[in-house]
Amino acid sequence: MNEPIVARHWLAIVAPKAAPALATTTVLALARIWNGNGAEHSVGNAVLMTTLSLGAAAAGACASVGRAGDSVIAGTAFAASGALAFAGVAGYADGMSLPLLLWSVATAGAYGLAARYWRRDRRDTLTYERHVSERREERAHIERVETLRATTQIEVARTGAAYAEQLAAALTARAALPGFDPKSIESTGLPALPGAEISKERGW
């Protein structure tokens, strides 16, 4: 009944918390590499990234409209739109001040969105653990009740057997006494003793 306790590795605990910062830092690093390879003050590259960012935003808006809208697809599209816009600005700018400012804003926004999903996941986890705990308590209660019932039945059977043994021993001892009349026992409704039947057969 006892389930093994599995300890999570510290990387499995830290990785989800560090994912937003790693994502924005990776975009910043790639944008600055792109900046050093000809994207700085490149109007064509800026137009390309702007077009891609607007396209991703439009896809996110379409995915979130209507009853058939998918929040996962919409969120992914908006995240891609923001990442493309951030990469475009960081690749176009000639200094680090603006890219770092956008990196801090993007990181804060990513953690704000992630915290919402973390709270929902924590709530679902707590609900599941509470449900499992209630089921375990219910099963443990049923097991305790069944154990008590079986123990009671065993004790009742033992008590009945002990009573029968004591009654038989008492009647046997009484039959060995002089002047004992087996008919007086039978007249009270008790079963006849084997000794009395043997005495009748032998004519004692």
Image (cartoon, rainbow, N blue to C red):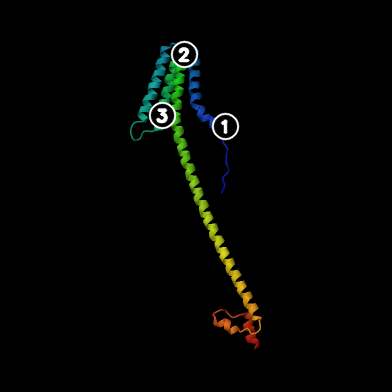
Q: CA distance from mark 3 to mark 2?
A: 28 Å
| Mark 2 Cα-neighbour bin, 10 Å: few <14, some 14–19, many ≥20 | few
Q: Secondary structure at mark 2?
A: helix
Q: Secondary structure at mark 1?
A: helix
Judge left or right: residue 102 versus residue 198: left
- Residue at numbered disc 3: 75
Viewer-closest of 79 and 188 = 188
Amino acid at pointer 2: Ser
Judge left or right: residue 168 versus residue 109: right
**Mark 3 and mark 1 in contact (Cβ < 8 Å)?**
no
Query: Looking at the image, is 123 positioned above or below residue 88?
Result: below
Residue 10: mark: 1
Amino acid at pointer 1: Trp
Residue 142's spot in the image, x, y percent?
Answer: 51, 54
The quadrant in which the C terminus is found is bottom right
| Mark 1 Cα-neighbour bin, 10 Å: few <14, some 14–19, many ≥20 | few
Judge left or right: residue 3 versus residue 64: right
